Image (cartoon, rainbow, N blue to C red):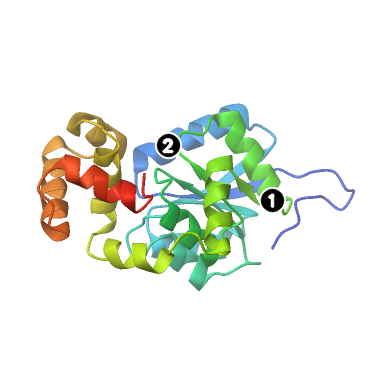
Amino acid sequence: MNDVTSPTGTPRPVRIVIVDDHAMFRAGVRSELTTVGAGVVDIVAEAADVDSAVTAIREQQPHVVLLDVHLPGGGGVEVMRRLPAPDARYLALSVSDAAEDVIGTIRGGARGYVTKTITGPELVDAIARVAGGDAVFSPRLAGFVLDAFAGSIDVAAVDEDLDRLTEREREVMRLIARGYAYKEVAKELFISVKTVETHMSSTLRKLQLSSRHELTRWASDRRLL
């Protein structure tokens, strides 16, 4: 992996690859980092799925990969499996703050995990810290990791339940369970309201639930909110 300091010891811009399957989100991150991270970060590539991410990381040799958890082709964990550290340091940047996503991603090799509610300056700071070797989490997400390794979260049981759902159904399920309206979910995930309705119907059917109230209780019992 390329060093983040020059031969004279002065800091170099942190080379990053942005991996997310939503083009609008990638554009937003690029714009924000270009504005607030000038001289600190250098965006060298973007990717929308596992295969293109692996190719970009191999070609560009970034210091840090901003990695979404849910990606076409196997998810962020598959990227890390195919290109484990020290080829790159991974910082998960995801809409999901569910315990099983956080724990699974860290176990897969990520150095940190932040959610997409993070501000631009906070993200620049997180990238710089991960590039320097630190582990970066919000306090709540760090608590998930500590709980998992202390044995107070049964990750295997949670995973077994969620295996019935697709990655997109999981995203819709969490937002609906948190009280989001269909239009708000559609805006958050860059999909149509009709698509949200379809995923919701499929999720209820697979989990054998009959209402969003039952879904909220189901998700709360499993600490997915």
Q: Circle 1 sits on which residue? A: 131
What label does residue 56 carry, if any? none
Q: Which mark is residue 27?
A: 2
Tell me which residue sits at (40%, 43%) in the image.
95
Q: Nearer the viewer, residue 67 or 165?
A: 165
Check the image and name the residue furthest to the bottom. 82
Give the quadrant of residue 188: top left
User: Does residue 159 appear left or right of residue 209 in this picture?
Assistant: right
Quadrant showing the C terminus: top left
Helix, strand or loop at mark 2:
helix
The image quarter containing residue 34 is top right
- x, y (%) of residue 98? 41, 49
Q: Is residue 120 above or below residue 206?
A: above
Residue type (three-letter) at the residue carrying disc 1: Ala
- Find the distance from the CA under tag 1 to the CA under tag 2: 22 Å
Where does the N terminus fall, quadrant-wise?
Answer: bottom right
- Residue type at mark 2: give it: Ala
179 sits to left or right of 17: left
Where does residue 46 sit, x and y in percent of width and height?
46, 49
Residue 113 visible to the viewer: no
Q: Secondary structure at mark 1?
A: helix
Measured from the top left, where is residue 72 in percent x and y?
32, 60
Label 1 CA crowd tier, 10 Å (few <14, some 14–19, many 20+): many
